[in-house]
Amino acid sequence: MTEECTETELTHQQPHQRPRFRNYKRWWRVSLYIFLALGGQSAATLLGRLYYDSGGNSKWMATFVQTAGFPVLLPLFLYFPTTHDNSSNMSNDNFSETKPKLYTLVFLYIVFGLIVTANDLMYSYGLLYLPLTTYSLIGATQLVFNAVFSYFLNAQKFTAFIVNSIVLLSISVSLLAINGESNDPMGHSSKEKHMYMFGFISTLVASATFALHHCLVQVFFCFFYH
């Protein structure tokens, strides 16, 4: 009797343990991705600033190296192939009908590639003309634009944390813009002020473009591969 009870308890516990294990695995992967994103972004910013401080002046070279590491992702793409849920309501025939044509994919990749190129070029100008701390703070506004574009394009709801981040980052960037216009130290020429404002605007537009790019990628590919 006791053996039967223990077997039934184990069978009842296994379905509950599997989703919990999957949640742990999922959050471990999310934590790893966050660490890699923050570490890679910080290292790239410091190396870009070091490039300009060491005498480098090529904005195109600084633009190219921002995405030159994509071949590293190819082995991971081949090792973790894309899988589709067999339990979905869409059959394989319907999936093949909604799968985009080759010329459509080529067009989307070209457009997204041009957006990324323009975005990286604006980031290069911003890193050249702005101090590192100012550049980093303005670059963080990508989170604000990401939340706004996700709300309108991806039906992502606002939360208290998102609203708090938007308000704080918006105030910080506004103070930076006012400080750049009114509290410049003596001896700065009008050309240097114009370069500062150009770097400020370039970084801000690049942050907005980067967030819009992510949202558009999700919209188009979720539409084709849903």
Image (tube, rainbow, N blue to C red):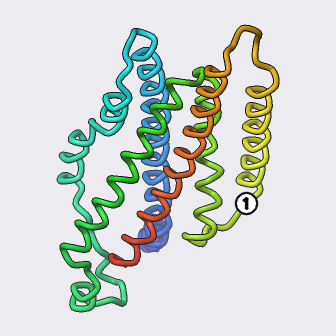
Q: Residue at x 67, y 15 (%)?
A: 189
- Give the image quarter of residue 152: bottom right
Q: Is residue 137 left or right of residue 184?
A: left
Q: Residue at x 42, y 47 (%)?
A: 29
Q: Nearer the viewer, residue 168 or 57?
A: 57
Q: Nearer the viewer, residue 87 or 16?
A: 87
Q: Residues within 10 Å of mark 1 (few under 14, many from 20)?
A: few
Could you tell me residue 61's position as x and y percent?
Answer: 31, 28
Could you tell me residue 216's position as x and y percent?
Answer: 46, 65
Q: Residue at x 18, y 46 (%)?
A: 75
Could you tell me residue 102's position as x and y percent?
Answer: 18, 73
Q: Is residue 132 left or right of residue 25?
A: right
Q: Nearer the viewer, residue 15 or 146?
A: 146
- Give the image quarter of residue 150: bottom right
Q: Nearer the viewer, residue 39 or 146?
A: 146
Please state the total of marks drawn on the protein image: 1
Q: Is residue 163 left or right of residue 66?
A: right
Could you tell me residue 108's position as x and y percent?
Answer: 31, 66
Q: Is residue 71 left or right of residue 214?
A: left
Dot 1 falls on a residue whose secondary structure is loop
- Considering the image in quadrants, where does the C terminus appear? bottom left
Is 65 placed above or below 206 here?
above
Is 217 placed above or below 225 here?
above
Label 1, on which residue? 159
Look at label 1 and name its amino acid. Thr
Q: Residue at x 77, y 56 (%)?
A: 160
